Amino acid sequence: MRTIPTEESLDIEFKSDLKCYPDHDLIEEIVGMTNTSGGYLFLGVEDDGTITGVHKKHKDPIGVAALIANSTVPPIAVRAEIINEEGKDVLKIEIPRSRGVVSTASGKILRRRNKLDGSPEVIPMYSYEIPSRLAELGMLDYSAQPLAGATLDDLDPNQRIRLRRIIQNRSGGEKSLLSLPDDELDIALRLVTDVAGNYVPTVTGMLLIGKEERIAELIPTAKSAFQVLEGTAVRINEDSNKPLLELFENYETYVKAWNPERETEYGLFRIPIPEFDWSAFREGLVNAFCHRDYTMLGRVRVLIDDEGMTISNPGGFIDGVNLKNLLTVEPHGRNPVLADALKRIGLAEKTGRGIDRIYEGSIIFGRPWPDYSESTSRSVKLFIQRAKADLPFAKFVADEQNRQGKPLSIYVLMILSILNNERRCTAERIVELTNLSESKIRSAIESMIESGLIEASGKGKNRTYILGKKIYRENKETIQYVRQTDIDSIRYPELVMKLANTQNGIITKQNVVELLKVTPQQAYTIIRKLQSEGRLELLCGGKYSKYKVINP
């Protein structure tokens, strides 16, 4: 069985060694990979994946690793080994992702990217890209840097008044800041920094309270756009270089006009349910401006169209963050000083867990989860689908939160959402869908069983979970509840026999899995029960076993 990948990617590289691949080219490839995402280089494999073997000069893995370490600054510690594939030796080099910026011994700094056709290439890393790389690794806070060419006169007094008003009106704002005079307020929020005995604006200071024309001149990367499309008709299309505090207020005003609300009865009250949750929108917007890469050309873009709302920003996820750990990774961002200022002002989550709010905003109304799947190494894209609220589910969640006197955790909400959509799930399936650890899921499940939110049936690997009877009662689906808990399991044997009789008396375990939506082990248990009752017999064994109906 082949262990080498069949095609190249951003972290997989093939190099032919039939004519002895030049060492300096090998070093440049490895520098480009370590400055991007690391990966594996296979020496002795053609670009199309054909294995042709490594040259005798490169059959010493220790020597090649030493060559790479001696030819890079700082030295790269790779792991190299000879593997045998299809009867030929191949040198496999494992390249770590660097924790800084690496160059060749001759001073070349390189990075890796995908070309338009999807194939990878190594290109120079220019000087202006180095701060972006360091910020991505969490080694440089660009937002804390003094802004070249900026003076205190570039800060707008009207924006500082806006800042004080936001602190006063937002529940999370630090009210103690309001007692400080302007110069001390700027220092406390690190809007300015001391350079050779004089205070000058930082990037954060200009972004938050700078004059619009000076932001456009001094930080040309700090652009944003708000767009609304109805079909192909453009309703709003505004580009801006305004300071962030003014932008947040403007964008909230725009969204209100394009975020219709539907009222629903809740006891004696009527509650408005917006198309897009306000907290989710605010957190998505703050995250986009807070975590964007201000060294890259591009813009933060808010788009509302027939499909939903998209909020995107230049700069991929920071090192250590990916699609699978968004909800569990330790909070850390690309611009810590900017993030801290937004928290103290009251615009951002104090805990740094704004992502929880974004997920919660969709889940509590029974809507599809936020989608980050179109994010790349160069941008982050949040998509919130336009969808009708599941009102019975939303009421059930609200009732439960009122009963407990506190909000439900994001883990509990995710489990409830999954069971509401899939009806019945194993713990393994829930872990797969949430990307949370099994221990957290099982802990949440047990507490939910105790509180009656969900119910369990079966044992061991066959143990499955459904929503508790309260949600079925709320949905007026008591019949479906009984079917989920009792009738289905009683009817399973008859359904299996009916299917077998329609297939010329033959059935397989996979047929049972697809018919009953159960696990392979559960399907096998049902078949064994029918065998013990003398209704089925094994026709042929092996991986694809078949069973035959026994006619009385």
Image (cartoon, rainbow, N blue to C red):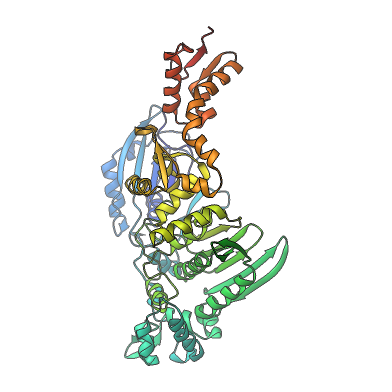
Question: Residue at point 53% right, 50% down?
Answer: 474
- Based on the displayed image, in which of its 4 quarters is residue 263 positioned? bottom right
Name the residue furthest front: 268
Up the image or down, 302 lies above or below 148; here it is above
- The reply to whether residue 384 is visible in this rendering is yes
- Based on the displayed image, in which of its 4 quarters is residue 92 positioned? top left
Pick the front one: 276 or 323: 276
Left or right: 88 in relation to 46: left
Quarter holding the N terminus is top left
Up the image or down, 144 lies above or below 410; here it is below
Name the residue furthest right: 233
Up the image or down, 64 lies above or below 385; here it is above
Pick the front one: 198 or 113: 198
Q: Could you tell me how many numbered marks the image carries? A: 0
Left or right: 389 in relation to 376: right
Name the residue furthest top: 552
Pick the front one: 142 or 444: 444
Residue 329 % position (x, y): 36, 57
Question: Residue at point 44% right, 38% down?
Answer: 5
- The reply to whether residue 9 is visible in this rendering is no
Residue 530 % position (x, y): 46, 17
Residue 284 % position (x, y): 50, 65
Residue 371 % position (x, y): 52, 54
Left or right: 469 in relation to 449: right
